[in-house]
Image (cartoon, grey):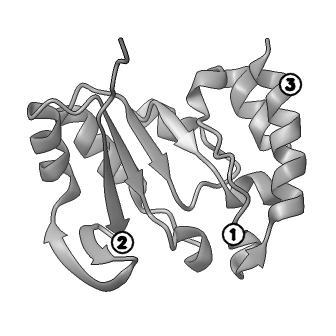
Amino acid sequence: MLAYRVIARLDIKGPNLIKGIQFEGLRVLGKPADFAKKYADEGADELLYLDTVASLYGRNQLESLIEETSDKVFIPITIAGGIQKEVGHFFRLGADRLAINSAAVRWPDIVSSISQNYGCQALPYPSKPSASTAAGKPTSTGAARKRAKTRSAGLRKR
C-alpha cells in the first residue's frame, strides 16, 4: 500500500504569504506562520516555505519566519529561496531541510558541506535543471546543475 505525505507549500514574498497563478497577479494572504499552524493542525506532514525571488534580489527574510513557525508547529520545515553559503543558523532556528538551487551553482561545495555537517536528509535536492538567479541575474544553469547533481549523488550513497 502506498503511503502519502502531505507537504504544504507556502509561497513567501518578504514577510507575507502570497497567492497567485503562475506567480502572476500576486495577492497577500496574511502571516505565513498562522497558515503554517492551520496546515499542521489539519494534518500536513511537512511545510515548505518558498521565496522564489529571494536569490534574484539578494535577500533572505526567512529567519524570523522560521523561528516564529517552529514555536507554533511541530512538523518538519523545509525552506527554499535566498540560501547563502552559511546555513547553520537556519537549522538552529528550527528548519529541518534546505532546498537549494542558486547556492549550489554559486558554491558547488555547499552540497557536500551540508551533507557532511547536517546529514544528506537535510538537503532535498531538486532533479530538474532549470533557470536560476546565480550571481543575482537569471542564468540557465542546466550544465552546472547537472555537475552539482552528479556530485550530490555520491553523497547520498553513504
Q: Is the residue under label 1 in contact with that under label 3 (CB below 8 Å)?
A: no
At horizontal 34% and vertical 62% (from top left) the residue drawn is 11
The disc labelled 3 sits on which kind of residue? Answer: Gly
Distance, label 1 to label 2, CA atoms, is 17 Å
Is 133 left or right of 139, judged from the image as shown? left
- Quarter holding the N terminus is top left
The residue labelled by disc 1 is: 132
Mark drawn on residue 32: none
At horizontal 80% and vertical 58% (from top left) the residue drawn is 105
Residue 37 in which image quadrant: top left
At horizontal 84% and vertical 46% (from top left) the residue drawn is 148
Label 3 SS: helix
Sequence-first tag of 3 and 1:
1
- Quarter holding the C terminus is top right
At horizontal 76% and vertical 51% (from top left) the residue drawn is 104
Where does the image place residue 77, in percent across and percent down from the top left?
37, 36
Residue 153 in which image quadrant: top right
The residue labelled by disc 2 is: 13
Label 1 SS: strand
Mark 3 is surrounded, within 10 Å at the Cα level, by few (under 14), some (14 to 19) or many (20 or more) other residues, namely few
Vertical side of 60 occupied by 39: above or below: above
Where does the image place residue 63, in percent across and percent down from the top left?
40, 51
Sequence-first tag of 3 and 2:
2
The disc labelled 1 sits on which kind of residue? Answer: Ser
The residue labelled by disc 3 is: 154
Residue 14 in which image quadrant: bottom left
Q: Nearer the viewer, residue 1 or 158?
A: 1
